[in-house]
Image: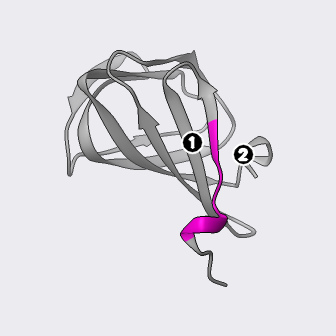
């Protein structure tokens, strides 16, 4: 299956946080998330395992109480049901997130 970029819509999830759900299958989903400088994804948790990488900019992440600043090339893992949050630093950020299983609300 192929998905042309023009077929992928952008959804504003939160103020300054935009998601593009690139594609999904039965067991995994890949999304591009763009965060404006200072945008925050508040502390939350979900049953999906989440892995990701920073493509550009920088984000401050808290995963299970551990805090790090992630920059391009850094990767992260959010285990199922672990509280986590992200805040874009002054340059904003673009990240790729993979969820397993796929998030129904992101389809």
Q: Is residue 40 left or right of residue 81?
A: left
Q: Where residue 59 sits: x, y (%)?
A: 29, 28
Quadrant of the rendered image containing residue 12: top right
Extreme bottom residue here?
1
Q: Is residue 35 left or right of residue 60?
A: right
Q: Where residue 91 sits: x, y (%)?
A: 22, 27
Q: Secondary structure at mark 1?
A: strand
Q: CA distance from mark 2 to mark 1?
A: 9 Å
Q: Are marks 2 and 1 in contact (CB under 8 Å)?
A: yes
Q: Is residue 19 left or right of residue 61?
A: right
Find disc 2 in the rendering and name its residue.
106
Front one among 96 and 63: 96
Q: What residue is drawn where x is 19% and y is 39%?
A: 71
Find disc 1 in the rendering and name its residue.
19
Front one among 82 and 55: 55
**In this view, the mark in front (2 or 1):** 1
How busy is the neighbourhood of tag 1: few (under 14 within 10 Å), some, or many (20 plus)?
many
For the N terminus, the quadrant is bottom right
Q: What residue is drawn where x is 62% and y is 82%?
A: 2
Q: Is residue 74 left or right of residue 8?
A: left
**First to last magenta residue range:** 5-11
Extreme front residue here?
6
Q: What residue is drawn where x is 52% and y is 39%?
A: 79
Q: Where residue 18 sits: x, y (%)?
A: 54, 36
Please give the label number shown on residue 64.
none
Front one among 66 and 40: 40
In the image, residue 34 above or below residue 69: below
Count of marks overlaid on the render? 2
How busy is the neighbourhood of tag 2: few (under 14 within 10 Å), some, or many (20 plus)?
some
Quadrant of the rendered image containing residue 106: top right
Q: Would residue 77 be counted in the magenta stretch?
A: no
């Amino acid at each position: 299956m192929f998905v042309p970029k023009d077929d992928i819509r952008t959804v504003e999830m939160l103020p300054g946080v935009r998601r593009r759900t690139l594609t999904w299958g039965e067991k995994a989903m890949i999304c591009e998330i763009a965060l404006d400088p200072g945008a925050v994804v508040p502390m939350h948790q979900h049953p999906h395992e989440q892995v990701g990488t920073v493509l550009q900019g920088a984000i401050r992440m808290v995963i299970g109480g551990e805090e790090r600043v992630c920059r391009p090339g850094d990767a992260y893992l959010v285990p199922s049901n672990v509280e986590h949050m992200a805040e874009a630093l002054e340059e904003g950020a673009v990240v790729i997130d993979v969820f397993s299983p796929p998030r129904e609300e992101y389809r």
